[in-house]
Amino acid sequence: MAQTAERAAHELLAQPAPHAPPAPHLAPPAPHAQPAPHLAPPAPHRLADVVPAPAQVQPASAGDWVLPAEAVIVASADPAALAVATQLAELLRPATGYPLPVTHPTAHPVPPGDAAARSLPPADAAARSLPHADAAGLGPAVDGAGLGPAADAAGPGPAGGIALVLDEAADLGAEGYRLDVARDGVRLTAATATGLFHGVQTLRQLLPPAIESPTPVTERWALPGGTITDTPRFPYRGAMLDVARHFFTVEDILRVVDHLARYKLNHLHLHLTDDQGWRIAVDSWPRLTSVGGATEVGGGPGGHYTKADYRRIVSYAAARHITVVPEIDLPGHTNSALVAYPELAPDKVAPPPYTGTEVGFSYVDPADERTYDFVTDVLGEVAALTPGPWLHIGGDEAFKVKGEVYTGFVERVQRIVAGVGKTVVGWHQLAPAGHVDGRVLQWWGTNADDPTTADAVRRGARLIVSPGNHAYLDMKYAPDTPIGHDWAGLIDVRKAYDWDPGTHVADVPATAVLGVEAPLWTESVTSLADIELLLLPRLPAIAELGWSPRATHDWADFRNRLAGQGPRWQRAGITFHRAPEVPWPNTPTIPTQRDTAHTDTTRIS
């Protein structure tokens, strides 16, 4: 049997000829596997029923693929590919109850729990950082699924298995993938592990919604046949979480990371500092957290992240191919810092802690060199914790720092960012300041006619587009939404979807648009359930704008595909708003549980 598995692994990973058909022949089922019935029911989903919409979809009439209990997941013999393969196995095991061992062409598969797992070769550090379980079902990337030789010759056969092929020659870019589904197996190809990971999210959505169940259920685990070839429109696709107005635990942030990963978003922007609280530890300025971190909106206890907490968030996100973008908001939104260190204040007097929601009243002293010592220390320590290229310096709503004083401050801070090896990002109020190489402006306006930003783009800036009246997810859906704001208008799902990041800001060419981001400010948000209620279902709309070709943009089609996500969120226990403009299934089908009953904790507005 071990020889059969090894031979099948080589077959699954063999590269197709240059002119091979879209769905190449994959490994045949092992002799003991049950063939699919001739008149088996079709897969419950079309190949195109994916969010974000794939770039190219080629359905095949040859038939669906059904995951057999004996299936093996075979990956290229590369630690990064094997890590993604194991994430796939951990995603599929809870609902299916199948062992789904992971192997590569030069090894025999090891089932979960096999004693041989103790001698597995090391995987990459990011994969090893994964905790045992997470809300989206992505568990540890090294867990005994088997990345090395088995202790004996026994091992499951490859029956109709899944191959993850890392092919650097594939013309799929840094994040693209190709998914081939045939009756006798599945092949997922990418040039990078990031592409493989995105392909896994597509495979996940093509399985029945019950795949999100945390316990085994009885289901026909079918994928529709055909080929998907998919690459993103924009390289930057993100969401922002404000953890300063209200503090959220590390576990809450990891849950948000899972939501981003599900929809192929690749950046998490953390708004770490504001008037109401300072959330990131800085060793050289310890009172920032001990004093400045002890408050939040409404007078709650606040909180902060230790450096170990922050590293955990960064590592967890990296294992899901998401880059963390930290924001230290300067020169305004700094009351919490001034409470902790009054020497940074213009009058050198500590203000009282602030737990309200007004903006624009606080600022660090731009005329004092001690301020720049502070900025250099803080940005240096945050940069050292952050492997990604970006460092966000805020810059918005500094109403009391005007004209040349403001631009002079920004230009000096931009140089500090460059000095610590990072690329500066800031809200579009930075636009009048002098340009530095690579500078990125995050545009959050509501009037697309913005000549100041357009001029900054002509001088070399790139844009992340986050229009307040389309992408700000703290806006209410409707007047009766129980939380959120309406200063930028009401944003239902269609308004979140019906705009184009590439053409939205006047006189800014699409080539200058780095991508799109959906911010969530938390003045009225106090729990994970609140976060999810405002994120979903609008976050997938923003994700589609960032990933999918503009030619696929179609509200009627999107709303139908989005409706299919509802039963998945229900099975996963995820809160979401049942938006009336989306045709959600009236009575979701709940497959029979195969063991202990699951209590559905989904909150639906």
Image (cartoon, rainbow, N blue to C red):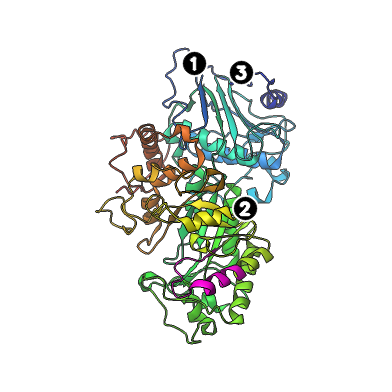
Closer to the camera in the image, 380 or 281: 380
Who's the residue at 50% across and 39% down the image? Answer: 94
Label at residue 473: none
Who's the residue at 36% across and 69% down the image? Answer: 357
Work out whether mark 2 precedes mark 1 in sequence or the reverse, and give the earlier one. Answer: 1
User: How far across and down, in percent of the image, does residue 528 sit?
Assistant: 41, 56
Reply above or below: 348 against 88.
below
Label at residue 129: 2
Amino acid identity at mark 3:
Pro
User: How far across and down, in percent of the image, does residue 378 sit?
Assistant: 60, 71
Magenta span: 393-412
Pointer 1: what residue?
61
Crowdedness of circle 1 by 10 Å Cα count: few (<14), some, many (20+)? Answer: few
Work out whether mark 3 precedes mark 2 in sequence or the reverse, and give the earlier one. Answer: 3
Q: CA distance from mark 3 to mark 1?
A: 13 Å
* Residue 491 lies in the magenta stretch: no
Amino acid identity at mark 1:
Ser
Pointer 3: what residue?
21
